[in-house]
Image: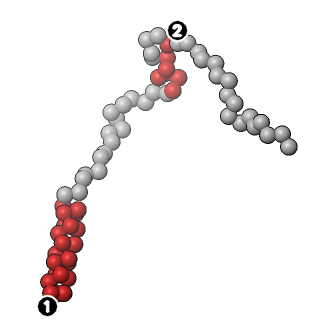
């Protein structure tokens, strides 16, 4: 008799959890493609107020230099 109560309780909990997920799920976000006008990458960087005075940083990239000599 106790096994039936345990199984019934587990079934009710599973059904309640499934109903909660179904009815209270988070709605998916929808993007408005007209919200932002189309701008190319070059135009985006040239619109900065001080785009002419931006400093350049030189970097000594040693990512693919291996010191092992076989």
| Of pointers 2 and 1, the one earlier in the residue sequence | 1
Q: Nearer the viewer, mark 2 or mark 1?
A: 1
> Which quadrant: the C terminus?
top right
The residue that label 2 is drawn on is 53
Q: How many marks?
A: 2
Q: Position of residue 24 (x, y in %)?
A: 19, 58
For label 1, count other residues whose C-alpha is less than 10 Å away and answer few (under 14), some (14-19) or many (20+): few
For label 2, count other residues whose C-alpha is less than 10 Å away and answer few (under 14), some (14-19) or many (20+): few
Q: What number is the disc on residue 1?
A: 1
At 60% from the left and 17% from the top, the residue drawn is 57
Residue at far right of view: 70
At 24% from the left and 53% from the top, the residue drawn is 26
Q: Position of residue 52 (x, y in %)?
A: 52, 10
**Quarter of the rendering containing residue 7:** bottom left
Q: As rendered, which of 9 and 52 lies closer to the eye?
A: 9
**Quarter of the rendering containing residue 18:** bottom left
- Dot 2 falls on a residue whose secondary structure is helix
């Amino acid at each position: 008799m106790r096994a039936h109560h345990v199984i019934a309780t587990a079934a009710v909990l599973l059904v309640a959890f499934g109903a909660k997920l179904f009815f209270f799920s988070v709605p998916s976000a929808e993007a408005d493609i007209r919200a932002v006008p189309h701008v190319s990458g070059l135009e985006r960087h040239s619109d900065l107020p001080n785009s002419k005075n931006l400093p350049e940083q030189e970097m000594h990239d040693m990512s693919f230099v291996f010191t092992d000599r076989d």
